């Protein structure tokens, strides 16, 4: 019997296996921010190496604090300024704000006998120049820088000052003043935009008159001055409370150059917290925001010398503004949901910063630990 020829079964054509790398969210962030994370790792190592040497540690801590505080707080004072002046050269913006900084800090140094903080560090618990450091005091501005990179607008006041304060009473006073500032800003912005939304809308139609650009630069400059008088304490807390001439030059020069880098980067990652809000790129809208913010900060500056979180005030201002605009426009449920989501996200961000700063303060300070133990068990 003849053999029948067996036909081979159909076999799929072989292809070389292609390995496809799958990234999860962590992998994407890791690859995208590789250089920055290397910088953070090196900074943490440097902080660990120098903290036992106070004369070196104070300047290293100041450098970290100066860079991280300016990067984080840029959204409050110069965020709207950057966002609404995208057509202007970065170096003109830098020179304008930089020279205001030099004038502001020079006046404080001269008027208050070497104190560059307008006596914000005269508050009980912060009035003494640090004579020794622990590792977490130098690491806290690095942690702040890390949070800033991922667009979390945490409070530099709590992150940097709470790790130096000697008592829990000082932290409570700062929290109370900051909460008051948040609600004052929220209610002020809500009322203003509820009552004046239609008028403001008329102002921001069409091309802005040159007057608005001049007004915005002047108001932004005034806001920058008020913010500096409030928040320079966050940076100078590492340094002597009365600086000599050489220390003053080093302090001023470092921050002046840091501002230049910030303007060159157009606010960097944290600027997105501003850009996602409604109409902030319009010079007229930005001017109104800055005017309200500067008046609120000026009021709290005059109340007392207790440091406060200007970040909380600014977040409250934006939240009240967004809600007021939505209520006045009778927007859809979807737009209201988006607004509440933005407000909630910003509140979560500043709350995270507060929790982290309190944990750091308790971990560092044995006086606060003892106060908590006495409160809990006595």
Image: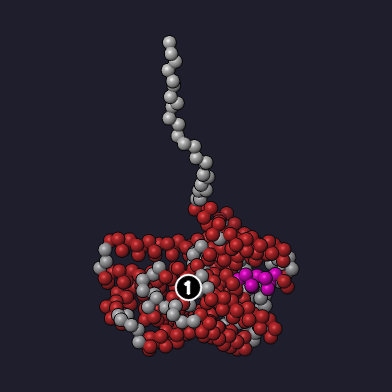
> Residue 332 location, x and y as percent?
26, 63
Tell me what residue is drawn at x 51 percent, y 70 percent. 268
Tell me what residue is drawn at x 49 percent, y 68 percent. 270
Q: Up-down: is 101 above or below 280?
A: below
Residue 174 appears anywhere in the view: no
Q: Quadrant of residue 113?
A: bottom right
Q: Up-down: is 153 above or below 193?
A: above
Q: Up-down: is 69 above or below 4?
A: below
Which stretch appears magenta? 57-65
Q: Quadrant of residue 11?
A: top left
Tell me what residue is drawn at x 52 percent, y 57 percent. 29
Residue in the foreground of this view, choosing between 70 and 124: 70
Q: Would you say residue 64 sits in the magenta stretch? A: yes
For label 1, count other residues whose C-alpha is less than 10 Å away and answer few (under 14), some (14-19) or many (20+). Answer: many
> Residue 58 location, x and y as percent?
68, 72
Q: Quadrant of residue 135?
A: bottom right
In which quadrant of the rendered image does the C terminus lie? Answer: bottom right
Q: Residue furthest top?
A: 1
Tell me what residue is drawn at x 52 percent, y 48 percent. 21
In the picture of the structure, the residue carrying the numbered disc 1 is 75
Residue 63 appears anywhere in the view: yes
* Main secondary structure of the magenta stretch: helix
Q: Residue furthest left?
A: 330
């Amino acid at each position: 019997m003849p053999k029948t020829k067996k036909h081979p079964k159909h076999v799929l054509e072989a292809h070389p296996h292609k390995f496809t790398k799958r990234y999860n969210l962590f992998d994407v962030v890791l690859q995208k921010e590789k250089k920055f994370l290397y910088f953070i790792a090196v900074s943490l190592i440097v902080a660990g190496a120098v903290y036992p040497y106070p004369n070196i540690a104070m300047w290293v801590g100041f450098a970290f604090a100066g860079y991280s505080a300016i990067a984080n707080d840029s959204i409050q004072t110069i965020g709207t300024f950057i966002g609404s002046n995208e057509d202007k050269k970065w170096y003109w913006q830098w020179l304008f704000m930089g020279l205001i900084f030099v004038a502001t800090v020079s006046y404080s140094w001269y008027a208050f006998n070497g104190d560059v903080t307008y006596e914000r560090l005269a508050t009980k618990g912060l009035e003494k120049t640090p004579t020794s450091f622990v590792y977490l005091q130098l690491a806290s501005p690095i942690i702040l820088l890390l949070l800033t990179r991922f667009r979390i607008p945490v409070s530099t006041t709590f992150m940097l000052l709470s790790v130096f304060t000697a008592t829990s009473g000082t932290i409570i006073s700062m929290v109370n003043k900051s909460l008051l500032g948040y609600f004052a800003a929220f209610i002020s912005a809500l009322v203003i935009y509820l009552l004046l939304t239609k008028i403001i809308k008329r102002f921001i139609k069409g091309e802005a008159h040159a007057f608005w650009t001049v007004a915005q630069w002047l108001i932004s400059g005034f806001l920058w001055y008020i913010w500096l008088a409030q928040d320079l304490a966050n940076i100078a807390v590492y340094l002597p409370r009365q600086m000599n001439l050489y220390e003053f030059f080093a302090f001023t020069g470092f921050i002046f150059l840091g501002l230049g880098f910030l303007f060159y980067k157009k606010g960097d990652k944290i600027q997105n917290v501003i850009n996602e809000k409604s109409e902030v790129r319009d010079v007229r809208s930005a001017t109104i925001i800055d005017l309200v913010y500067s008046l609120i900060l000026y009021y709290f500056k005059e109340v007392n010398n207790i440091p406060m979180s200007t970040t909380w005030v600014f977040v409250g201002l934006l939240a009240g503004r967004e809600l007021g605009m939505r209520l006045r426009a009778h927007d859809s449920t979807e737009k209201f949901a988006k607004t509440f989501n933005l407000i909630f996200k910003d509140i979560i961000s500043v709350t995270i910063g507060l929790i982290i700063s309190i944990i750091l303060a308790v971990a560092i300070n044995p006086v606060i630990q003892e106060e908590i133990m006495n409160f809990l068990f006595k």
